[in-house]
Image: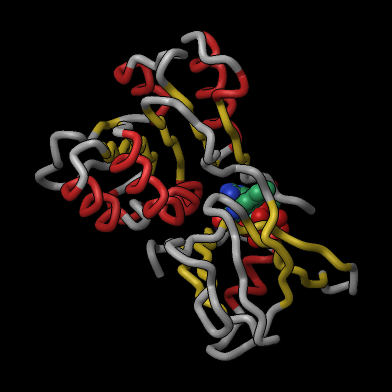
């Protein structure tokens, strides 16, 4: 468990095939409701991507368990070694090779942060090769829910161009880092002066947060192509 209701799950393909994907993409898990109807749910790939995953390498996802959720029941019922059906990768919530921006504003709540974990090696390359800056604004209710927080903090400590700004809506950690904020991510966007001349923004996770940040960024003058969004809505 990454947090009280979030599991980090690791799978390997059992067909012996590799899985290449672009950080930011997701897979779909296929299963059946109790009445036999087929359904599926999407999960962003959390595996830190520094090479195409060869046969037998772990495909990682972070799943937030929701009360009464159908996929939640599936995942909670899995034992070590059980198999699930999945397809993918899908999606275009990715860093673009021809991006010429000076800064990425990466914004997430909850498991919406997993695409950014997968992107860390690409961000490291962009920092080294293009001299860009990155701000990661990550919303969680409590310090226990700051998924992969130690990894992002370590990455920020090693890369001064990467700022990690955890925003806690309920409870602050004891002895918080100076970059920690108290409130919702959307309250702190203005502090970073979003600028259409320099910024490309990514928004991932809770749909209300994504919509609120999208409106703020548009008001700040960012054109829509510079605001990339992934809303975690249920696909049932
Ligand atoms: C592109 C994409 C990527 C996604 N990536 C992830 C991911 O990496 N990790 C992840 O955990 N989820 C992710 N999701 C959401 C995920 O696909 C499911 O919607 C989620 O896991 C709930 O599925 P469920 O079957 O357990 O609940 P459902 O049976 O679909 O819903 C049960 C009840 O819970 C409510 N509910 C659904 N989702 C939430 C929620 N997030 N918070 C509170 N209540 C909710 C529903 O309204 C419903 O009342 C993603 C969605 C999309 C579209």
Count of number-bearing discs: 0
Colour treatment of the image: secondary structure
Quadrant of res 233: top right
Quadrant of res 123: top left
Against 222, is 229 above or below?
A: below
The residue at the point 63 percent across, 56 percent down is: 26
Viewed as shown, does residue 163 lie left or right of 219? Answer: left
Quadrant of res 21: bottom right
**Residue 95, percent from left and from top:** 52, 41
Against 45, is 127 above or below?
A: above
**Residue 183, percent from left and from top:** 33, 30
**Residue 219, percent from left and from top:** 52, 8
Viewed as shown, does residue 121 lie left or right of 212? Answer: left
Viewport quadrant of the N terminus = bottom left
The residue at the point 70 percent across, 50 percent down is: 234
- Front position in the image: 93 or 83: 93
Residue that lies at the very extreme toward the left in this rendered image: 175
- Front position in the image: 35 or 227: 227
The residue at the point 38 percent across, 22 percent down is: 189
- Front position in the image: 99 or 104: 99
**Residue 156, percent from left and from top:** 22, 45
Q: Is residue 31 visible?
A: yes
Viewed as shown, does residue 16 lie left or right of 186? Answer: right
Against 23, is 227 above or below?
A: above
- Front position in the image: 230 or 208: 230
Residue that lies at the very extreme toward the bottom in this rendered image: 81
The residue at the point 18 percent across, 50 percent down is: 158
């Amino acid at each position: 468990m990454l947090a009280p209701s979030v599991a980090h799950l690791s799978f390997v393909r059992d067909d012996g095939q590799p899985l290449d994907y672009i950080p930011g993409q997701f897979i779909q898990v296929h299963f059946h409701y109790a009445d036999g109807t087929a359904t599926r749910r999407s999960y962003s790939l959390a595996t830190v991507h520094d090479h195409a995953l060869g046969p037998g390498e772990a495909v990682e996802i972070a799943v937030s368990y929701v009360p009464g959720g159908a996929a939640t029941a599936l995942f909670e019922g899995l034992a070590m070694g059980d198999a699930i059906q999945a397809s993918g990768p899908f999606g275009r919530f990715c860093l673009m090779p021809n991006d010429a921006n000076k800064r990425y504003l990466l914004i997430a709540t909850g498991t919406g942060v997993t695409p950014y974990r997968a992107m860390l090696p690409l961000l490291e390359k962009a920092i080294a090769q293009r001299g860009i800056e990155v701000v990661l604004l990550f919303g969680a209710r409590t310090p226990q829910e700051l998924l992969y927080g130690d990894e992002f903090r370590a990455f920020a400590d090693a890369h001064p161009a990467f700022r990690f700004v955890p925003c806690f809506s309920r409870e602050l950690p004891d002895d918080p880092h100076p970059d920690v904020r108290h409130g919702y991510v959307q309250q702190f966007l203005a502090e970073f002066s979003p600028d259409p001349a320099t910024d490309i923004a990514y928004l991932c996770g809770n749909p209300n947060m994504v919509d609120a940040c999208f409106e703020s960024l548009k008001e700040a003058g960012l054109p829509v192509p510079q605001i990339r969004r992934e809303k975690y809505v249920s696909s049932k």
